[in-house]
Amino acid sequence: MELKGIGALVTGASSGLGEALSRQLARSGARVAMVARGEARLMAAVERIRAEGGEVHAIPGDLGRQEDIHRIGGAAAALVGPVSLLVNNASTLGPVPLQPLLDTECEELERALAVNLVGPFRLAKLVAGAMALRGLGVVVNVTSDASVNAYERWGAYGASKAALDQLTRIWAAELEGTGVRMLAIDPGEMDTPMHAEAMPDADRSALPSAVSQAERLLAVIRRAEHWPSGARIELTKEVLR
Amino acid sequence: MIATGVAPAAWPRPQPLEERLLHVDPARGTLRDVRVIELPELLKPGDVLVVNDAATLPASLPARVNGVGAEIRLLEDLGGGEWRAVLFGPGDWRIRTESRPPPPRVSEGELLVVAGLDARVTQVSPLSPRLVQLGFHASPDAFWNAVYRRGRPVQYAHLAEELPLWHVQTSYAGRPWAMEMPSAGRPLRWSLLLKLRRQGVLVVPLTHAAGLSSTGDAELDRALPLAEQFEIPRAAAEAIAAAKRSGGRVVAVGTTVVRALEGSFAQHGRLLASAGRTDLRIGPRFRPKVVDGLLTGIHEPGTSHFELAQAFAGADLLHRALAHAAAQGYLSHEFGDSMLLLGGKG
């Protein structure tokens, strides 16, 4: 998709992959609404990108809260125009440090589903109708290899991402022919605050940076029509150039 | 308003597709009761359904005028942080708009606090002391985050409870341009829209900044709707042109769509992909140049909606339709039942 001048909405945008992707979208000429829970960190990320001349806007909000969704979507459409690209990137790990399911509180699983599954569903529902009428739109759901592999201690996160993958496929089937494309994209392991939270002992120098994964993600978005809608794309394996 | 006996719907109902639809055929002078889900049977391949994709913003904002609580309802975005707005006195939507005490008087240059933001009164309208222009001292981010945090949807006394924002959105809403919901499209669920498309009925959007329907000031109410902003994208203009060439009918979903299409036509002499403002008033003597039919709510005589409907059906037929709707238990207002004014072969 052509990125210049489009309205984009990126969640989890105050750090890691979300911030790096917002910066690259802005460099490509997109107008970007950046969403995150922590207002101070979000404002700092927005200011860093603005200093480079990008058009980005800060919308503080929590994807896990129903009443925040319409605020986020409404403010985003007011600030960047019709949203043609939604990147559901915000995620929560569930219990930290990671726990086996027997030690996971039910409320922790509910919270993981609220942020990682229901929030992305609500936001997609909010923007995909207008996208379908205009015949243009891409929704990216950021997923993980924890959605396909049964990693011990990744139960809440893995189950929520598996459900998100399936939601992506069903969205795609239902919106076939409308011009709206749905993609589940797995960026793989990378050096982000979330990775450090999940695996504090990992060797960070061995991990690809969020910036390099954001570049790959951007390349996929630019060529979104090359994949069937509903596809699950692994950035580690895809040949992008 | 003249009461017709059509009761207002006090709350959204769970199955919009099961809501009632009165098909008024102005060519035959006939009335027919169906359900919204049967709309595809009243349209044919080549017809175009034009919807208003404006989202509804929470345009009712808490304000402080001279330290006293008041309510501001946004009316029109003039750009650059300037808004046309209407002041309301003490109380809230639970009190009938016309029964609310008048708002505090404000004068040009006065500083108000609106949704927690400083706003300067830059103009008081000669039309009414409650119609003002405000200049907000805030960045776009700060303005919109405050509106969405502090604002509430505009609503009126016929409703049972305070509306959450999601109850005043259509299923295809995009940019928040509307101060009140473009409600004619509210019952159109995606299962229905996708069915219409499969059947060869084009569904295309335009955006029209629907204003307020009531201000509590009788003189100002008579001047409504004031000029409103619209944007007609290329896809809509092309679909309409194709329908005109091939004998398809153009059906407007809501009076705001009629205003945008006919207003743009009046400005350009033909229908173009265009953006602008229109203050076109449409009534019984208006001959539509673009729109062939109208899907709308059940509107009382004496409202601007009823006036506009008379451009599509005679007053006698509309009065007959309202009497029928009342007798059959149809509901009115934004969460009520619908009426399709459309002649020709379905």
Image: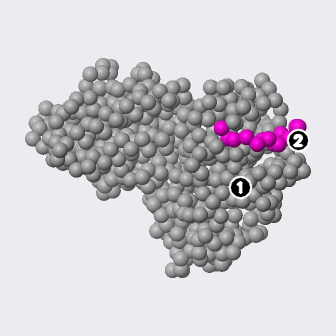
Q: Which residues are magenta?
A: B23-37
Tell me which residue sits at (83%, 54%) in the image: B323
Report the quarter where the C terminus of chain B lies.
Answer: top right
Residue sitting nearer the eye, B127 or A172: A172
Q: Which residue is mark 2?
A: B29
B89 or A240: nearer the eye?
Answer: B89
Residue A199 screen position, x and y as percent: 14, 41
- Report helix, strand or loop for mark 1: strand
The residue nearer to you, when weighing A158 against B280, is A158
Query: Residue B220 — which label?
Result: none
**Residue B238's image quarter?**
top right
The amino acid beneath tag 2 is Gly
Residue B278 horizontal/vertical position (percent): 73, 50
- Please, is residue B200 above or below residue B13 in the view? above
Disc 1 crowd, CA 10 A, few/some/many (<14, 14-19, 20+):
many
The majority secondary structure of the magenta stretch comes to strand
Kindly identify the residue that appears in the image at 86 percent across and 51 percent down: B320
Question: Percent from the top left, x then y, of residue B188?
Answer: 62, 41
Is label 2 in contact with label 1 (beta carbons under 8 Å)?
A: no
Q: Decide if residue B60 is on the left or right side of residue B254.
A: left
Asked whether, in this view, residue A233 is left or right of residue A7, the answer is: left
Q: From mark 2 to mark 1, how far is it between C-alphas? A: 22 Å
Nearer to me, A76 or B140: A76
Is B10 placed above or below B127 here?
above
Report if residue B330 is visible in the image.
yes
In magenta stretch: residue B289: no
Tell me the element at label 2.
loop
If you read the primary sequence from the N terminus, does the residue marked by circle 2 or circle 1 appear first?
2
Query: Could you tell me which chain the residue with mark 1 belongs to?
Result: B
The residue tagged 1 is B332
